Image (cartoon, rainbow, N blue to C red):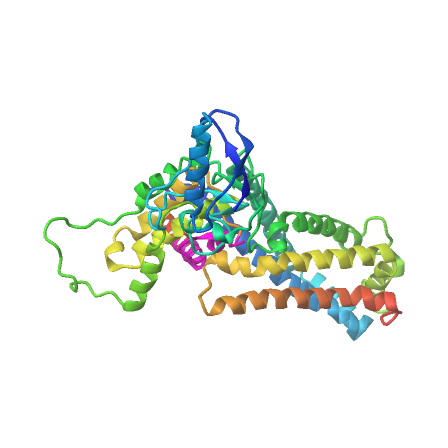
Amino acid sequence: MNLTLKVWRQGGPNHKGKIETYPAEDIPEEASFLEMLDIVNERIITDGGEPIAFDHDCREGICGACSLTINGVPHGRESAITTCQLHMRKFRDGDTIWVEPFRARAFPVLRDLVVDRSAFDRIIEAGGYISARTGSAVDANATPVPKADADEAFEAAACIGCGACVAACKNASAMLFVSAKVKHLGNFPQGQPEAKRRVLAMVRQMDEEGFGNCTNQYECEAVCPKEITAEFIADLNRGYAKASLEETLG
Amino acid sequence: MPSAASSIVSFYRSSIGKKLVVAITGLGLVAFLFGHMAGNLKVYAGPDKINSYAAWLHSMPALLWAARLGLLACFFGHIVTTVLLVKQNRAARGEVGYAYNATVQASRASRTMIWSGIIILCFVIYHLMHYTMCIGNEYESASYIDAAGRHDVYKMLVDGFSWFPASAFYIVSMALLCWHLSHGFASCFQTLGLRGERSWPLIKAAGYGVAAVIFIGNCSIPISIMAGWVSY
């Protein structure tokens, strides 16, 4: 396949970036999107240029490292996959593809297509944990968990924290991410001791990081590679309202 | 432990706190829309019914003003909080936007809420000047007192909507209001956390239903007056 790439190039966090055009010729259609970028980068290096910087790690859709907004959609148009799982056969020969970083004020560009997503780490640090006794393992069935609750928590726990929800949101809101984390810990008895503190602290950190506010357009759930539902955002809203009320009256 | 006052302040400063204020005030405004529409539809029952309804409302000034102040609080709470949210949201997007913009599933109504809202605000100002404060017209003069000595709301409505530009602006504004509600109504439930997997399709359908009922009910009045079906 022969393609044209329009790629965001930016030398560093404080550099002014711009879109540059690269030919991507003789690309095998079984290549993944990242492999296609590898091929293009090898040619750029051969020609003496600076390769395009992009994030990647496991390349099998489970680590959350890869990003890229492809033709305006984080992880591309195909649903429920990450960029590393996107294959070139989904494009047509001769296509022009726009490749941009995940954009949000809270995700500053470090270089080219690499953005700093440590804001998510700080949200997790604020409350995305449970306090558990370490040492000898507790018997697996000591605390009964209803199957439906466990299933729902598992759906929320599928979030890999890639940040596509933020990148797709017209308001750069991180509420799908935060709601998934609050849900997955709060759905278990083990997550109850910190439940109230968790939701307040994580939402406050989210606001502090400069993410926007959900306006219920659900672009986030449409692009989420793990199909996290916006229903969790409704649960987060209710949980936050309840915890705030308890704090006010408490 | 923070004090109650500081908790309330930090609640309003938070993203979800502000969203909840917009949702609750929005539902308050929807409740008003239904009450207002039900009252106005009395125009079809004839001059006596609607004039006596208006006189009844004005016979309880304390209650009327309490309702008006509540409505005003919802109105300003909804607008001011939304403007704050929009400002934050624009800032959150960052200075550099996407060169290639795409939308996967966000509805057009959801992406133009601020614009439909601003036009509705202009309409509300005009509507209040037109019928409540009677600026630029003679609806408070002696010729608008009916045989029973009451304010002739019926005649005021017929005269007001007989002027084509007023009716046209009214219908366009109602269309935008319903466009606003088609996203806003279901959104309130999402923000309040009152949705489940099974109830969500029903809530969305109810949002479209509410929008349609408000549009048809309200627009029927200027249309009936322009067509001459309601006259004196």
Front in this rendered view, residue A20 or B182: A20
- Vertical side of A7 occupied by A174: above or below: below
At horizontal 55% and vertical 33% (from top left) the residue drawn is: A19
Q: Nearer the viewer, residue B60 or A182?
A: A182
Q: Is residue B82 left or right of residue A155?
A: right
Q: Residue furthest bottom?
A: B45
Q: Nearer the viewer, residue A83 or A219?
A: A83
Q: Is residue A167 above or below residue A193?
A: above
The location of residue B225, given as percent across then percent down, is 85, 66
Q: Is residue B230 magenta?
A: no
Residue A52 visible in the current orientation: no
Residue B24 placed where, x, y %?
53, 56
Residue A66 rendering spot, x and y as whole percentages = 40, 43
Q: Can I make out residue A216 in this image?
A: yes
User: Residues in magenta?
Assistant: A216-239
The image shows residue B142 at horizontal and vertical percentages of 88, 58
- Relative vertical location of residue A197 with respect to residue B186 in this rendering, above or below: above
